Image (cartoon, rainbow, N blue to C red):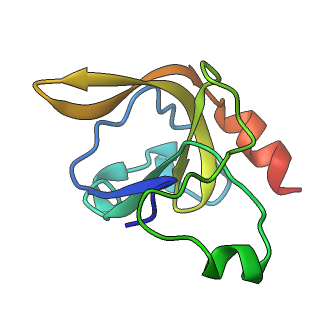
């Protein structure tokens, strides 16, 4: 596992605020989302990034510190299958790390970034 990115398989993730519209070509306008709710996705939390040369990379050893571009206190980025979906902050619950979502990117904004 990369020190900057923690990944986890997400199964049975709750679906919040899904609004089914009436797309053209769908009889009655009902959309059954049950078909996609059990598809596993990769959830990643990124603490930060750094660019270093291969020379410096090869000089890293146990105890080395790699400075990240982010400052202390900046929110983490939360990605689902490589797409930014939220920002959050690190929390510790029962001696395990977690992330508290502080800002969720709206579906409209995610679609706008795809274009």
Q: Residue visible at 41% across and 65% down?
A: 62
Instruction: Say which quarter of the image contains residue 22.
Output: top right
> For this view, does 84 lie left or right of residue 79?
right
Q: Quadrant of residue 104?
A: top right
Residue 94 falls left or right of residue 35:
left
Q: Position of residue 4 (x, y in %)?
A: 52, 53
> Which is more toward the observer, 16 or 55?
55
Does residue 31 show up?
A: yes
Q: Residue at x 44, y 49 (%)?
A: 31
* Lateral position of residue 70 relative to residue 89, left or right: right
Q: Quadrant of residue 109?
A: top right
Spot occupied by residue 57 in the image (x, y as percentages of width and height): 65, 75
Q: Is residue 71 left or right of residue 6?
A: right
For residue 109, above or below residue 62: above
Front-most of residues 60 and 41? 60
Residue 22 seen anywhere in this rendered image of the structure:
no
Residue occupying the point 27% across, 34% down: 97
Quarter in which the C terminus is drawn: bottom right
- Residue 67 image point, x, y percent: 67, 46
Which of these two is toward me, 37 or 60?
60
**Residue furthest left in the image:** 94
In this picture, is 89 found above or below 37? above
Q: Quadrant of the N terminus?
A: bottom left
- x and y percentages locating residue 3 in the rendered image: 45, 57
Residue appearing at x 55%, y 56% in the figure = 26
Observer-nearest residue: 68 or 63? 63
Looking at the image, residue 1 lies above or below residue 49: below
């Amino acid at each position: 596992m990369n020190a900057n990115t923690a990944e986890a398989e997400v199964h049975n993730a709750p679906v919040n605020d899904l609004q089914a519209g009436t797309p053209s070509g769908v009889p009655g306008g009902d959309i059954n989302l049950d078909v996609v709710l059990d598809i596993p996705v990769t959830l990643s939390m990124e603490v930060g990034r750094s660019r270093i040369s291969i020379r410096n990379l090869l000089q890293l050893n146990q105890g080395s510190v790699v400075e990240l571009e982010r400052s202390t206190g900046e929110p983490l980025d939360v990605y689902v299958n490589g797409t930014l979906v939220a920002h959050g902050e690190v929390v510790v619950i029962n001696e395990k790390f977690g992330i508290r979502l502080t800002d969720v990117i709206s579906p409209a904004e995610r679609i706008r970034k795809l274009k």
